[in-house]
Amino acid sequence: MDKERATYANDEDASHASSAAKQNMIDSQPTQDTQGELEQLRQQAQEYIQAKQWSLASQILKKLLDHNVHDEDTLRSAVLVFDVMGHYEFVLTLAETLLDRETNAAYALAYKARALQKLDRLSEATIANDQALLLDTNLPLAWINRSGLQLLQQKFPEALRNAQRAVELAPDDARAWANLGIALLNFNSLLDALEAFNKSIACDPTNLFSLKLKSETLFKLGRLDEVVTITRQTLAIDPINVDALTHATRALRSLERYDLLQVTAKELTVLEPKNHFAWENYMRGLRGSGNFEAANDVLDHLLELDPSNFRFWTIKADTLYRLQHYREAVSIADRAIFINQDYPPARRIRERALKLMYQRKKV
């Protein structure tokens, strides 16, 4: 009887195990409902990609990768999105996953090369990119990569040729035009470079790198009003862009637009509290607008940052002079002269302040 019970129990356990295994197989296969949900997610991801809503697209693609990390369509979409977002460690992982599926996938090698380049692994990037070009000589990303690598290696004639090839193959790719612009800059072809950056921005109006390069080129050309315009365009996309605020500050100071200068430089001081350039231009904006009291307070902060700067001591002496604090102006000018005895502006301010100080005493 015990033997029969044992046999029955074993049969029952085996039956349960078999049923459990079958259920696991069923659970592991997508149901119709799950397949429908996955297809909906794929469509949604593509809609976000088309709209260049990269962050939203990335969230959905992560869900799809969690479900199936080897799905080729998802991997292709993900490598594109995370490249745009600058997540290059993840791009490298995705590219290598694609290469595990297909060793000779040229596009995957090109993305691997791009990620390695951005991670400063230039030798590995060059090898991967050369492999991609051997497999597909008309692959736009590989030519973009090659020109970018040569720019980093300061091989400017080769970079120019390969950037031209890249824009032939990918006239709608902002990166190809940006590389061409940089190559042209190195030959001092400023107007041609500016045209390339304009085409890059036309391809992607939110491309901060091309906007920055356009701003720098306009500055070199002396077109300062346009520098202010392009930096505003940049700041509308990225309000805390330090490069844009710096370029705008330089242009506004040269244009002597002091009201805007103090606003822009003040924003820069918030982002970079120890930036002497930002504080100095904030002070100059205040002085240019006639607000010498506020400028004097900013000068105190500047001198805390750089107490040996005789120029700042001289400007403070001049500011006190304009505020009719002549005795203090003389004392501060003496500080500047003590640091640099051969600095004429400090001596001139001291003499003027000293003269008016004695005139006031006589009165």
Image (cartoon, rainbow, N blue to C red):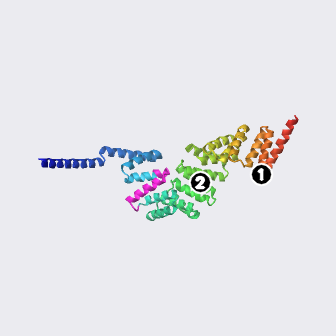
Number of callouts: 2
Whether the magenta-drawn stretch holds residue 102 is answered as yes
Q: Quadrant of residue 355?
A: top right
**Residue closest to the eye, 84 or 188:** 84
Farthest top residue? Answer: 363
Q: Position of residue 232 (x, y in %)?
A: 60, 44
Q: Could one spot residue 45 in this view of the protein?
A: yes
Q: Is residue 321 left or right of residue 195?
A: right
Amino acid type at mark 1: Asn
Disc 2 designates what residue? Answer: 195
- In the structure shown, which secondary structural element does the residue marked by tag 1 occupy? loop
Q: Which class describes the residues within 10 Å of circle 1: few (<14), some (14-19), or many (20+)?
A: some
Q: Amino acid at mark 2?
A: Glu
Q: Residue furthest bottom?
A: 134
Choose between 7 and 143: the one closer to the eye: 7
Is 320 placed above or below 122 here? above
The one nearer the camera, 263 or 171, is 263
Q: Find the magenta span and give its range.
A: 81-104
Image x and y of residue 150, in percent? 55, 62
Q: Looking at this rendering, what residue extends furthest in the front direction?
A: 2
Which one is closest to the eye, mark 1 or mark 2? Answer: 1
Q: Which residue is mark 1?
A: 340
Lower sequence index among marks 1 and 2: 2
The answer to whether any part of residue 227 appears in the image is no
Question: Disc 1 to disc 2, how far (Cα)?
Answer: 47 Å
The residue shown at (20%, 50%) is: 14
- 222 and 305: which one is in front? 305
